[in-house]
Image (spheres, coloured by chain):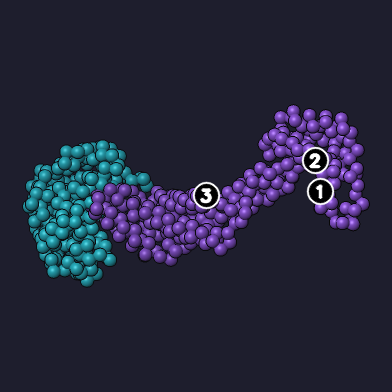
Amino acid sequence: MLVFLRYTIRETATNLWRNRMMTIAAILTVAVSLFLVGAALILKQSAAQASAHWQGGTRVTVWMDASASQSEISTIKSTLNSSPFVSSCVYHTQVEDWHEAQQLLPPNEASVLTVNEVPSKFVCVPRVPTDAAQLASALQGQPGIYQVTAPYQQIRAMQHMIRIVQYVFLALALVLLISATVLILNTIRMAIFARRREVAVMKLVGATNWFIRVPFVTEGFIEGLIGSAIAVVGMTALHTWYPLHGVYQLSTSDLLGTDIAVVAVGVFIGSAGSAMAIRRFLDV
Amino acid sequence: MIRFENVSKTYKNGTPALKNISVNIEKGEFVFLVGSSGSGKTTFLRLLLREETPDEGRILEAGRDVLKIKKWRVPYLRRNIGCVFQDFRLLPNKTVFENVSFALEVIGRPRETIDTQVPQILELVGLSDKANNLPSELSGGEQQRVAVARAFVNRPLILLADEPTGNLDPANSEAIMALLERINRAGTTVVMATHDQALVDRMRRRVIELDRGEMVRDQARGVYGTDSGETL
């Protein structure tokens, strides 16, 4: 076992060194592609977190006609209170809204606004953020209601944008991952070619197939490992110099999880690349 | 030790390599395999190593049916068979010592075994003083002795030699033959394919002649040509 370990370490190091240009190319490709994968993952997590935050703050505002009668207001109130989509509602009277308008509008406009012209409103918290749209459409057009507004369109547009960016990142990363795998496959193939004499002797004297294969597998494994380590360093550096703020900020454990995923992918493509090379080019 | 029972082998391109060969080689025998190029000598040796499998027939080595050995067990079969080739097949970037120790290392022998057995075998082949030289610094005869040392360091039951003297001058051929004889005297079965007529004639060992895949002669204490020697 000790012999095997020493042998494997020595042969792997020899392989890596003998093919160092190809080794560097493979490691850098792994690093760049995994950096993109990692960035896409962080973006996805961050976007998911931010959109959950915004959705939690979703309010459906039911604006009443300024001329709505008291009975219309109380009908809407009871409709809202009995709606399965609504968790709670607060009624703002015309006077309250008028005061709010005085603060929001420029003085020359605010001064011409009278209390009777200002609509009263219900501000409702939907039970689930995605119910906002259904609640709005259910109320729209009922007597006494002027307009129902909810910010779901903005949230949706934002999510859509983030998703497109994510897909672009992931597609780029996927292409790069494939090229990294092929590059690793090629370095291993060259290592096998460089060592064809040794391999022939090993077969002749009765080395087991796994004994012959293992140095090549570890070579790919190490290329994947170093490449993903560089990617993790890059991700950490990026995050240190350009930190995500506010609702986008991710917890350390989320970042660590992404780092682990990136390393796992790196090790996987390294091993997969060498496994393919061994299957195709090493006849044992 | 080695037994071929009605073994036939045809290569994919249709060339028959061996036709219905039956032969029995006892433990400790020294056998010459003679015949012109393409007569099937190398195929015979490759079948013993299970680098090839026959189309028909049965091959037994040390009582085991070679064809029934599972693919992943084949390396263990090869550990009992040493091999020497015309072109030496040494590793050019390893020293004499490393070339020999490599053979033990890759079958997982511990360091202590390597450190005792390699000097012993280098002593046997007379290359103790060249242990740290590279093959390129050695003569052809010395290189072949390293190859013999590598083949024999694991004390195999069988030693196969495919034209081991093919690249050597007569004096060096002599030295290699003396070495193979010595190994044979220690109890190892030696099968040697050769073109070297003078050598076969002088040694007077068992000769198996192949011609276009057929066994045309099997003589104890034979010679290279067909005219003399006792028929079995």
Task: Look at discs 2 and 3 and give the one toward the viewer.
Answer: 2
**Mark 1 and 2 residues: CB-CB less than 8 Å, in contact?**
yes
For the residue marked with disc 3, what is the amino acid?
A: Asp
Q: Earlier in the sequence, mark 1 or mark 2?
A: 2
For the residue marked with disc 2, what is the amino acid?
A: His
Residue position for label 3: A254
- Identity of the residue drawn at 81% across and 53% down: A103
Q: Mark 3 lies on which chain?
A: A
Camera-side residue: B208 or A47?
A: A47
Q: In which quarter of the image is residue B53?
A: top left
* Neighbourhood count class around disc 2 (C-alpha, 10 Å): few under 14, some 14–19, many 20 upward: some
Q: Where is residue B58 in the image (x, y as percent from the top left)?
A: 23, 37
Q: How far apart are marks 2 and 3 (CA)?
A: 41 Å
- Tell me what hue chain A is rendered in: purple
Residue position for label 1: A100
Q: Mark 2 lies on which chain?
A: A
